[in-house]
Amino acid sequence: MSLASEFKAFALRGNVVDLAVAVVIGGAFGKIVSSFVADIIMPLLGLLLGTLNFSKLALTLRAATADHPALALTYGNFIQASIDFLLIAIALFIVVKAINSLQRKQAPPPPQPSTEEKLLTEIRDLLKQPR
């Protein structure tokens, strides 16, 4: 089997194609959630806290001099990334929970016992009865 045919067999497996679709959709979903956080949540949170732009929040450790640039902890970026992560995790949890509930509803009913099992159950019940 040639390398090209092996790769074709690998790439066209169901799992690989499903994974590729999931990565593309996940990337698009991440952009939507990031935009939601950056454009809607953060301005509202900034308005409530009195700061409009979290990314500019920083603690200056050393002021800039002629020889050295300023040294600062930009904790605003960390706050932004943390809120992004939290909202993405919540959104994914809700999506996975919805998918799991749909899968449970579509589960086939348990199989009915065969005729032999029914007869054996009846015999067992009759043997258990007091005489």
Image: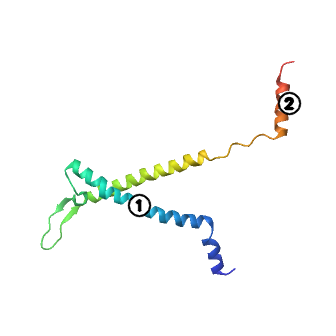
**Which of these two is toward me, 106 or 80?**
106
Residue designated by label 1: 30
Percent from the top left, x then y, of residue 14? 62, 65
Query: Quarter of the image holding residue 110?
Result: top right
In the image, what residue type sits under mark 1?
A: Gly
Label 2 sits on residue: 123
Quarter of the picture containing the N terminus is bottom right
The residue at the point 30 percent across, 53 percent down is 41
* Residue beneath the point at 48% across and 63% down: 25
Q: Position of residue 93 (x, y in %)?
A: 46, 50
The kind of secondary structure element at disc 2 is helix
Count how many numbered circles sit on residues in the image. 2
Using a 10 Å C-alpha cutoff, classify the residue at mark 2 as few (fewer than 14 neighbours), some (14 to 19) or many (20 or more). few
What residue do we see at 60% from left, 45% from top? 105
- In the displayed structure, 123 sits above or below 68; it is above
Horizontal side, residue 27 vs residue 14: left or right: left
Residue 40: x and y in percent read: 30, 55
* Side of 88 relative to 22 (left or right): left
Sequence-wise first label, 2 or 1: 1
Sort mark 1 into few (<14), some (14-19) or many (20+) by Cα contacts within 10 Å: some
Q: Residue furthest top?
A: 131
- Hey, which residue is sitting farthest left in the picture? 66
